[in-house]
Amino acid sequence: MAIGSCIDACPVVRDLCCCFVNPDREPGRVTLITRYGAAKIEDHLPAHIKSVQASGHPIVWICDPMHGNTQTSASGLKTRHFGTIVAELAACLRIHAAHGSRLGGVSLEFTGELNEEGLSVTECVGGSMELGEEQLGLRYQWKGADALVGGQSFCDPRLNFEQSLDVAFLISNHFKKERRNGGAAGSGGEGSGGESGPGEDVLYDELVGRFAAGAGAGAGTAGVAK
């Protein structure tokens, strides 16, 4: 079940979880996929977590950092910025940890598709390959010649091969540090420059700090395009 900023916390739990979907509170029966957008997650996820916890229902939480971070480029192409995607994911991990909850998974739209020359699609900007807006048209999977005007793609903008691996390794490194530090991903570690408290947002510091350049404006203007 997908929830966003337009979903009120109490009715979600009372009506959907309690009465209809999982009245017997069967573990694993209900999965909530949160997709707010990087600019809105702080305002809505805490209330949703608290509402679920108060209900006592066993919920599996999934973060969808793609859906709420879709925007339109200067050329008219629908796109997403890697920085805002990672920003929402980082915030989601941090908020769950702060509320004694746990993120159970991540939902991404990505493709490993390569052209005949072995080059990835260009639909989302940013990431380790530093793809810019001016490069979107290189291998953007569009419909027809009007795509540069209307942004009509076969599907919503997907992370490419390199960008999806960026996210995968960043998440893996986060949880590896968490295991090594006894459950606190922000409790220092090799290369961290010293001890730090469990509330430090290591994922944000290490990931968003590297990839969010230029994403600030996108986070503020991103809208749901579905």
Image: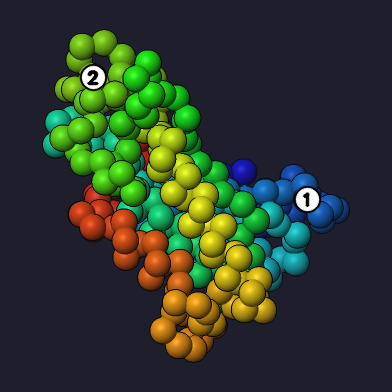
Tell me the tag on residue 147: 2
Q: Residues within 10 Å of mark 1 (few under 14, many from 20)?
A: few
**For the residue marked with disc 1, what is the amino acid?**
Gly
Q: Quadrant of residue 187?
A: bottom right
Query: Coloring scheme of the render?
Result: rainbow
The answer to whether residue 53 is visible is yes
Q: Does 209 appear above or below 5?
A: below
Give the labeled residue for mark 1: 28
Q: Does 121 appear above or below 182?
A: above
Name the residue: 69% across, 54% down.
60
**For the residue marked with disc 2, what is the amino acid?**
Ala
Q: Nearer the viewer, mark 1 or mark 2?
A: 2
The C terminus: image quadrant: top left
Residue 20 falls left or right of residue 4: right
| Percent position of residue 114, x then y | 41, 23
Say which element carries label 1. loop
Q: Residue furthest top?
A: 144
Tell me the tag on residue 173: none
The answer to whether residue 223 is visible is no
Q: Does 56 appear above or below 142?
A: below
Label 1, label 2: how far apart the Cα atoms are: 41 Å
Q: Does 170 appear above or below 68?
A: below
In this rendered view, identify the residue nearer to me: 65 or 126: 126
In this rendered view, identify the residue nearer to me: 4 or 74: 74
Residue 60 falls left or right of residue 177: right
Name the residue: 56% across, 74% down.
185
